Amino acid sequence: MRRVLPYGLWPSPLAPERMAAVLRLTDVQWDRSGHTRIWREERSGRGVLVAQENEGPSRELTEIESARARIGYGGGDFTTGDGFVIYVGEDGRLYRLPLAHGLPRPITPPFGNAASPALSPDGRWVLYVYSDGKTDLLALVDVEGRRWPQKAAEGADFYMQPTWHPTRPLIAWVEWDHPNMPWDGARLGLAHLEGDPPRPSRIEVVAGDAHTPVFQPAFSPDGRFLSYILTDGEWDALVVMNLETGARRILVEGTTLAPPAWVQGLRVYGWSPRGDRIFYRRQEEAFALLEAVDLDGRITRLDLNPYTWFEQLAVAPDREALAMIASSPILPPRVVTWEHGRLRVHRFASAERIPPEALSFPQTIQWRAPDGTTVHGLYYPPASTEAIRTGLPPALISIHGGPTSQRVMNYNPDAQFFATRGFAYLEVNYRGSTGYGRGYRDALKGQWGLLDVEDAVGGAQALVERRLADPRRLVIMGGSAGGYTVLNTLIRYPGFFRAGICLFGVANLFTLAAETHKFEAHYLDSLVGPLPEAAERYRERSPIFHVDRIQDPVAIFQGAEDRVVPPHQAEAIAEALRRRGIPHLYRLYPGEGHGWRRAETITAFYQEVLDFLRQYVLFA
């Protein structure tokens, strides 16, 4: 029998230590034989490569080394060859590591950073993205590292997703320039190579422009086609281009296919080995669907039950077998393969000792913004097999980062941590989020700091009106761009929320524009406006200039090595709150950057959040 206990104090199986023990699975690929799967998992900040041949036991490839690319927000950590992997080490260099025996050996010089290595079909060359923090380019190096790397493409501000033609001397990639982000506008480059070492002899742009983003180029295995995702209008389209005639066909359209490319190495589709169809992820609001489309445009939906979200789709080179990282709101991430309609699990991110019925399954929820736009969210009700309570629960209103991002129907450890303790939990996919059309995503341009705040408050009001949350115990929580929304909401709506939780949040738009990393150096040009013309707007929307209006308790968490939002922004807010006597908590975590990686940090963070909520929300 379930006991009657106060909301927020329910016994939860998700202790802070268990939160820290969950692996972060980031990528999975096949080797060139199709018999070995290689995936990457993060353990307390270290990127570990793991291999599994056929259905045999898995084994670690990197014992003390860490595979971790560091261009921008990371990603594109490794690629596979015939009996070896090429990965990016912590020092930014490319390393070659045999699958059988042998130690990793660097193949690039010890300066700058590499990402997204792609191996040539003959196994002799590695094409990769290189950055020294100021200049980005595509480079080529021989797979043994005997020669100095050569430039393959330069001149653009950014590069991603390089790929090789299977038989001809052709490479393709995506590039873009400031002030764009890759989802604003990008170009698909195609280069013909000549010589040994190969050098580009002719480069052309075959798709995309400053206003039309393009994503994930891939050559068909038979070499006839170049495929890519294009956003020319409201929705994405999967396009195939005949390399002989230049003719193009749209195979899939009218949906969301491409995620915002916050990191390198993202994949949402792949060609079948015969080149007769493409497997891809279609997104319907917050759900992911697995489908296949043939070259005539006939679409087949494949069953992924019980999973509602998957990432990093990879097709085996020798058969129609798919590997991916899949999850659902009540199933933590797993490395999964699909073959002949059968799903098989190869790696669990956690021990999965908690029964699914003890977790919260979210429901989609919508409400109207002041301008009439339908705003979207995911509502997690309190869940427990041990406790029950009547009345209205306290609620956490969670604001995702980006702000061009989205909360989806995957496993959300934060939501489960709080829902299993008797909190309601709302993920707000505010205007500016991905997944609901380009118009919805672009609505935040020039309006950051306004519409996100409106939608945070609107989501909380929707819960109150539907009797899903206690209006006296609402808490707003967010990190990075979401932390910026937390601070601005507390400033503009004092007293509406009982408290706020801000993780590495933006406090000063001027210093963000001046100090952030290259990838986002001009992001504010579209979100707020270019400087100096928009200086007054920057001042109006920077929390640091209005912190005297914050009346509610705030918990502030910050990484000491954060390069995106440096610690002095959080420290300035904390100092201003201290001077005015506003209840607050400030924690600076050594060794952490823009997010938590270390187990000890994750454990401490969740415990301190619980203590903060008990003091200022549950027992206040």
Image: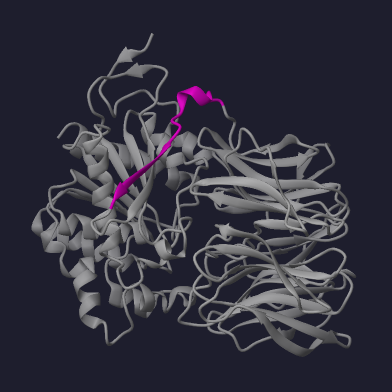
Placement of 181 over or under 12, stated as above or below: below
Which residue is depicted at the point 29% across and 26% down?
A: 9
Q: How many marks?
A: 0
Image quadrant holding the C terminus, namely top left
Return the residue nearer the eye: 587 or 317: 317
Answer with left or right where residue 328 lies relative to residue 290.
left
Residue range corresponding to the magenta coloring = 353-368
What is the x, y in percent for residue 264?
60, 66
Decide which of 174, 209 is in the foreground and name it.
209
Q: Looking at the image, can residue 149 be seen?
A: no
Residue pictured at 14% horizontal, 56% vertical = 550
Horizontal side of 448 relative to 40 (left or right) equals left
On the image, the x and y values in percent for residue 509 come to 29, 73
Q: Nearer the viewer, residue 269 or 358?
A: 269
Relative to 252, residue 354 above or below: above
Can you give x and y, in whole percent of width and height, for residue 371 in the image?
Answer: 25, 59
